[in-house]
Image (cartoon, helix red, strand yellow):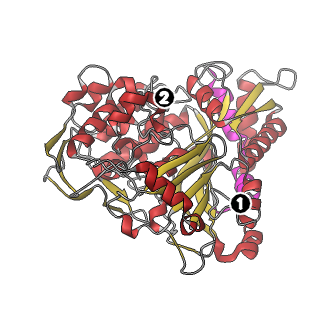
């Protein structure tokens, strides 16, 4: 039943109607990978939501809806889940996709050799923790195929499972391609997915092209025939491309006063609340921050967040002293003394802690802020460096890196000092934010924060259903990491995009996920 892929591709390429229906989307930095199990960033997540589909997926408004599974049921204790797959479910090469494919894919996700950075999100599945530690075989994972169309999942922790099953880490991978091509299975002509689109081209540092997957179960409802994601690390350049009609959806909007943007773009400017936090991380494993909480506290105190959100970002972001954004489901923010201080009192306290750390005008702290290429990141780094110089007298240099290099250096914790950080929620849960600081071997723990009591609180919370006890544990855990000054919180995100006014189906949602399958050009107005 294999598709005559070459014939299909040629016909689609030659079709004038197909090329005229192309949607061009800004997507930020070059995606690090298209391997669903190795993706941990927004740039690759956007692409994977078009190329793959989990058992469940997200509608245009972000609500969880049926995906590869058409229905499911859960036991009263929340630990036993059974999914019924859609009939005639196929991979993008035309081969049948079965429940066993999901079993094999989930096993790969938690196998230590896969080194999946988001595998911890699957920890609630029975035996996943032991497998991740290398103490049990992947075959012992609590996922079984009852038959070709029925999947059973057994949980150790009664978490809201559906949120996690919509993530790339739970999407199915086509193992025959991995067996033949290894890490190169993500290249055009090799990548086999099950989403609304199939990969047709990838020009490094330029664009990723996709075309409609005719084997997708809802292909008749997919209106956009071709989509091209372009690398847009510079927000100013992206804006110029939008104005020229070379980009239809921007990844972001360059920092300008909101009234100016409203006047210029009207309804094309889309701003929505977004469950995400931006901070500067501090590497706690090396000098000058190791064993120096006074210096870390001074840096946290010496930032004027109102100035940053009013004059640098300026698009609805909220000043942040914490890590978990307001509005996150089941969250209660800890009471932070520094947030209660006046700006003048914070400055005085910052200078006091800087001196206590052993620094002065004659012995200024030598600091480096590392960030990945982005107009906004550079402006923020410049502004924070100026605040640290003005308030404390610190000498600060900036280091800009290409995304992949930046990610590798940040994760290695060998040469970083201060670095651009933050977290966009995978699932709407405080635990999702706090888990990035858990465990010294956690690849997401880029600060190297290590606190057994913090880890124990998260472990305990993970076993509890939503409620006051769980919320209290997470609040206490957030207070611990903040009191250690592992990060310099800066602001809570808003999502902001420019969207071509001929495009329909782009809806704001808390996780800022916008799969192309929900969009269409208004009749007669395709570019």
Label 2 residue SS: loop
- Looking at the rendering, which quadrant does residue 521 occupy? bottom right
Left or right side of 232 for 511: left
Residue 403 percent across, percent down from the top left: 64, 37
Q: Kindly report the secondary structure that dominates the magenta region of the rendered protein.
A: helix
| Residue under pointer 2 | 443
Q: Is residue 383 above or below residue 16?
A: above
Label 1 or label 2, whichever lies nearer to me, is: 2
Residue lying farthest to the right in this orientation: 362
Q: CA distance from mark 1 to mark 2?
A: 32 Å
Residue lying farthest to the bottom in this orientation: 524
Q: What residue is drawn where x is 23% and y is 58%?
A: 86
- Answer whether residue 513 is visible to the viewer in this image: no
As drawn, the label of residue 314 is 1
- Report if the CB atoms under discs 1 and 2 are less than 8 Å apart: no
Q: 46 or 225, which lies in front?
A: 225
Residue bounds of the magenta highlight: 291-316
- Answer whether residue 162 is visible to the viewer in this image: yes
As drawn, the label of residue 339 is none
Left or right side of 228 for 116: left
Quarter the C terminus occupies: bottom right
In the rendered structure, which disc, 1 or 2, sits on the residue that comes first in sequence? 1
Q: What residue is drawn where x is 77% and y is 55%?
A: 236
Q: Is residue 304 magenta?
A: yes
Q: Is residue 116 magenta?
A: no
Left or right side of 67 for 486: right
């Amino acid at each position: 039943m294999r598709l005559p892929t070459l014939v299909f591709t040629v016909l689609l390429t030659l079709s004038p109607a197909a090329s005229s229906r192309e949607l061009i989307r800004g997507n930020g930095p070059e995606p690090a990978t298209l391997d669903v199990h190795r993706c941990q960033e927004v740039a690759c997540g956007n692409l994977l939501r078009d190329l793959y589909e989990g058992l469940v997926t997200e509608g245009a408004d972000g609500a969880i809806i049926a995906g590869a599974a058409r229905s499911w049921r859960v036991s009263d204790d929340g630990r036993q889940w059974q999914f019924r797959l859609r009939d005639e479910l196929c991979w993008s090469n035309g081969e049948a996709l079965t429940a066993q494919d999901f079993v094999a894919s989930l096993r790969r996700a938690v196998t230590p050799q896969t080194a999946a950075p988001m595998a911890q999100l699957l920890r609630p599945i029975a035996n996943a923790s032991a497998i991740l530690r290398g103490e049990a075989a992947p075959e012992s994972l609590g996922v079984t195929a009852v038959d070709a169309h029925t999947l059973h999942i057994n949980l150790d922790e009664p978490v809201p499972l559906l949120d996690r099953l919509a993530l790339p880490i739970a999407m199915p991978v086509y193992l025959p391609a991995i067996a033949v091509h290894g890490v190169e299975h993500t290249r055009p002509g090799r990548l086999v997915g099950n989403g609304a689109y199939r990969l047709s081209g990838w020009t490094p540092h330029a664009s990723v092209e996709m075309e409609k997957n005719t084997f997708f179960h809802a292909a008749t409802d997919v209106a956009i025939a071709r989509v091209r994601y372009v690398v847009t690390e510079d927000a100013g350049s992206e804006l110029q491309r939008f104005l020229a009609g070379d980009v239809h959806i921007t990844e972001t909007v360059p920092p300008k006063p909101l009234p100016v943007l409203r006047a210029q773009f009207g309804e094309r400017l889309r701003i929505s609340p977004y469950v995400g936090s931006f901070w500067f991380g501090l590497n706690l494993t090396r000098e000058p921050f190791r064993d120096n909480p006074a210096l870390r506290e001074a840096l946290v105190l010496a930032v004027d967040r109102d100035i940053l959100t009013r004059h640098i970002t300026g698009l609805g972001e909220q000043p942040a002293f914490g890590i978990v954004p307001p509005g996150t489901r089941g969250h209660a923010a800890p009471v932070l003394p520094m947030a209660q201080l006046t700006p003048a009192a914070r400055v005085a306290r910052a200078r006091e802690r800087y001196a206590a750390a052993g620094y002065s005008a004659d012995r200024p702290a030598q600091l480096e802020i590392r960030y990945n290429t982005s107009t906004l990141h550079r402006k923020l780094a410049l502004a924070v460096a100026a605040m640290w110089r003005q308030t404390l007298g610190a000498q600060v240099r900036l280091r800009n890196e290409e995304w992949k290099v930046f990610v590798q250096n940040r994760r290695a914790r060998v040469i970083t000092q201060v670095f651009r950080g933050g977290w966009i929620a995978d699932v709407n849960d405080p635990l999702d934010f706090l888990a990035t600081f858990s465990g010294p071997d956690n690849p997401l723990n880029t600060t190297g924060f290590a606190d057994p009591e913090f880890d124990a609180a998260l472990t305990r919370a993970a076993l509890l259903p939503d409620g006051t006890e769980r919320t209290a544990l997470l609040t206490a855990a957030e207070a611990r990491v903040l009191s250690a000054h592992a990060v310099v919180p800066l602001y809570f995100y808003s999502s902001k995009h420019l969207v071509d006014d001929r495009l329909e189906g782009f809806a704001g949602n808390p996780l800022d996920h916008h799969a192309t399958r929900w969009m269409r050009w208004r009749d007669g107005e395709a570019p």
